[in-house]
Image (tube, rainbow, N blue to C red):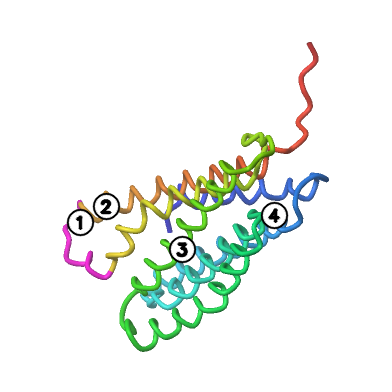
Amino acid sequence: MNFPSLFIQIICLLASLTLFFQASIAQYLKTFPLFIFVTLIVEITAWLLFKNRINVNLLYCFFTAFEFEYYLFIISFSLYRKKAKKIIAWVLAVYPLLVIINVFFIQPNGFHTITYSLGCLLIVAACIYYFFEIFQSTRSVNLVKEPPFWICSGLLFFYCCTFPLIGLWNHLSGLSDIILTNLNAIMQVLNILLYSLFSIAFLCRFPFRKSLQ
C-alpha cells in the first residue's frame, strides 16, 4: 500500500461527499463517493493479502477493468453527441468480455497488460473526444466550473503516463530495486495528481461563501 496515495484518496473521498450538498451538480457524479470508497477497500484488501503473501494479481486485474468501465461511464455522460455515447455503450459491453478472455486464456499467469493497455487507449480517446466537443461547442463554457473538465484532464494525463509503465508490468520483475523504487514513486505522484484533480472537480461548483469585505 502506498500511504501517500491512500491519504490523497481519503481526502478525495471526503471532497466527493460535498457533491450531495450541491444542488446544481449532475446526478451521475454522485456515484463517485461509492466508487472511491470501493477503491479504498480494494487497496486495503490488496495490502492485507500481500502482507500474508497471497497473490493479488487477479484482484487488480478485475478492479482495473472495473475502473475503466466506470470512467468510460462517467465520460459518456459528459458528452453531447448521441453517436459517441452509443460507441461508448458498445465498448462498455464488449470490454469486460475481452478482459475475461485475456485473464483466463491469454495472460493467465500475469497482469492483464494487453487489456489494460487497451483500456488506457480507450480512456485517452474518450477524453480527447470530450475536449474536441468542448472546442467545437458554440456555447460559452467556464471550464474552471466544469467537473468533467477536471476529471477528463486527470484521466488523460494519468493514463497517458501509466500506459508505458503498467503496460510493460510483466516485464519489470528483472529490473534493479532502485529502478523499481523510482517507478513506484512515479506511480505515487501520478495517483496524487489524479485524485487531486478529482477533488477539484468535486469542489469547483461548491458554493463557498465569500469572505466579507
Task: Please name the amino acid that badge 1 sits on.
Answer: Asp
For marks 2 and 3 on the same chain, the one whose residue lies earlier in the sequence? 3
Task: Please name the amino acid that badge 4 sits on.
Answer: Leu
Please report the residue visible at 80 percent of the width from the left and 44 percent of the height from the top.
Answer: 24
Could one spot residue 11 in this view of the protein? no
Please report the residue visible at 46 percent of the width from the left and 69 percent of the height from the top.
Answer: 46
**For mark 3, does the 10 Å Cα neighbourhood hold few (<14), some (14 to 19), or many (20 or more) residues?**
some
Number of numbered callouts drawn = 4
Left or right of residue 73, residue 54 in this image: left
Could one spot residue 116 in this view of the protein? yes
**For mark 4, does the 10 Å Cα neighbourhood hold few (<14), some (14 to 19), or many (20 or more) residues?**
some
Measure the alpha-carbon separation of dots 2 and 1.
Answer: 6 Å
For marks 1 and 3 on the same chain, the one whose residue lies earlier in the sequence? 3
Residue contact between numbered discs 4 and 2, judged by CB atoms under 8 Å? no
| Residue behind mark 3 | 122
Viewer-closest of 200 and 183: 200
Query: Which span of residues is magenta-colored?
Result: 170-178
Residue 109 at what x, y percent from top left? 31, 82
| Residue behind mark 2 | 181
Measure the alpha-carbon separation of dots 1 and 3.
Answer: 32 Å
Residue contact between numbered discs 2 and 3, judged by CB atoms under 8 Å? no
Label 1 element class: helix
Residue 179 vertical position relative to residue 113 in the rendered view, above or below = above
| Residue behind mark 1 | 177
Measure the alpha-carbon separation of dots 4 and 3.
Answer: 20 Å
Viewer-closest of 81 and 178: 81
